[in-house]
Image (spheres, helix red, strand yellow):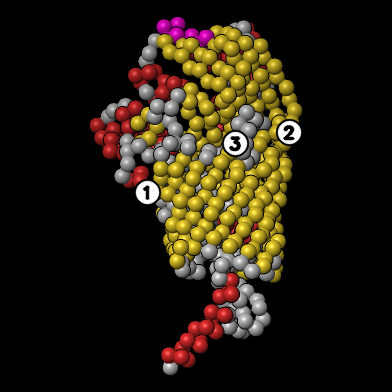
Amino acid sequence: MKQKLFLVAISICMATMSQAQKYMGVATGNWSGMLGVDLNPANVVDNRIKFELDMFGLNLGVDNNLAGINTDKISDFINNGGKIKDILNFSGDKQVSLILPYVELRLPGFMVNINHKNSISFSMKFRTMNQIENFDQSFFRTILDDSIANRTNYDITSKNFNWTINSWREFNFTYGRILYEKDEHMLKAGITVKYLAGYRYNSIKGNNMDVHFTGAKDSLNMNNTDIQFSSNIADSTSDFSNLSKNFASSLTNFSYGNGWGANIGIVYEYRPRIDDYTDVKTKELDPGRNKYKLKVALSIMDIGSINYNNTYNVSITGNGNITGNDALKNFMNYGSVRQYAESRGFKVDTTVGTTKVYMPTMFIGSVDYKVWKPFYLNVTYMTNMANRSNYGNSFYNQTTLTPRLDYKVVSLAMPFTMSTLTGGTKLGMAIRLGGFYIGLDDMLILMNNNQKGLNFYTGLYVPISKKKAKHGESEKDVIESKNDKVIQ
């Protein structure tokens, strides 16, 4: 029973969580504060918050195109017995990619509006990302699907694949400024400079791996092999069975790697009724009210890399043959792997040095349209810019359409996401009450037995919003006052 529960838990995680979506639904709001900075650093300036103290935040997610979870069969599987493949709806994708998991923990930070044209913020985060990119589906099905695992012979072929788990902390300083503001047009820009403190990483990448398994002989024939392995978790004598323990114990050490990163962005606002928000005497804009009819934002996020020192790197090329029993005996540490692999026909090169692990760089473009009073419609497109042939992580392309009601005290949004990784759609819900927010990107998991993604986030910040001007009247106020007198 315990084993079944464990398998179900793994399957649900694999099949029901998706990549972090930058707090979609909340971050696009006008009172989102530092969450909006996570979409575009230019959002730090000319938003509706004068000062913010960021308390904490948590964002959890995984994504996959391997299988969806059949929720109708979970109860029967646990109570009556069954096979793990019975609760999984495997996709037709030959090559599998997944993120399992992505974790972002927001630590205390702050945002300050210096004046109308300048703002700054400082934030700290802890992030972990475990990603598998472009592996043969047969590799996973031999583990999860008995009908394939029990075959006598089968082939596994993967090209241009990458598996990277990376854990790091980042310190972010953001500056934003209004560059142009005249009549109905406003343009602002922002930049975030990041100091990246790397903890631990493990990565395997390769150009090609052709494997033929012969079950009768417990033999693996590997042809045209071109694989590289890099890690700062183990050395030439470390036992591979303790890698997870070593990874966990290292999270209190901040000295394994370091690097620099950046986010850059611009935002344009079209304000066709700007006089409605302008004081007729002072000609100053009302800081407490949203002024745009249309907002267009462009940004590049997570530029940069971490340099890990004293890393152990292995390159395996050529053709060879290994058996399961021998592999279990010899794949204990780097030294034994090299000796065994060379004895089986492979060419093995090992080095110790500095390795660069890249951030999941991506481009984000969004359009926010004010439909009527507090009702807005947002479209956000995210696309990967990271080179997946490098050591490092990457996100997957997605488009999110989000209608929302946006007030100072409360925001309610329903993000509708189309993902290129899963090939499916998700319908979520997010709510903000003052500075508390919570969101879920897919409620369809409760109704659809083939959903492959779910992103959950929550957090708290203390906002001090800008107040509406009281010292004068806008042109709109003057007109309304004259109309009132005529009616009287």
Residue at image x 65%, y 52%? 265
- In the drawing, does residue 23 fall left or right of residue 358? left
Which residue type does callout 1 highlight? Met
Distance between the alpha carbons at the discs numbered 2 and 1: 43 Å
Residue at image x 34%, y 19%? 147
Distance between the alpha carbons at the discs numbered 3 and 2: 19 Å
Please state the horizontal and vertical placement of residue 291, each as a whole percent of the image: 56, 68
Residue 309: which numbered mark, if any? Answer: 2
State the quadrant of the C terminus. Answer: bottom left
Q: Is residue 123 visible?
A: no
Q: Secondary structure at mark 2?
A: strand
State the quadrant of the N terminus. Answer: top left
Please state the horizontal and vertical placement of residue 392, each as a whole percent of the image: 62, 34
Distance between the alpha carbons at the discs numbered 1 and 3: 27 Å
Which residue type does callout 2 highlight? Asn
Q: Which residues are magenta?
A: 214-221
Residue 393: which numbered mark, if any? Answer: 3
Residue at image x 39%, y 18%? 149
Residue 443: which numbered mark, if any? Answer: 1
Q: Are marks 2 and 1 in contact (CB under 8 Å)?
A: no
* Mark 1 Cα shell of 10 Å, populated few (<14), some (14-19), many (≥20): some
Task: Find residue 336 and report its image quarter.
Answer: top right
Which is closer to the viewer, label 3 or label 2? 3
94 w.r.t. 468: above or below: above
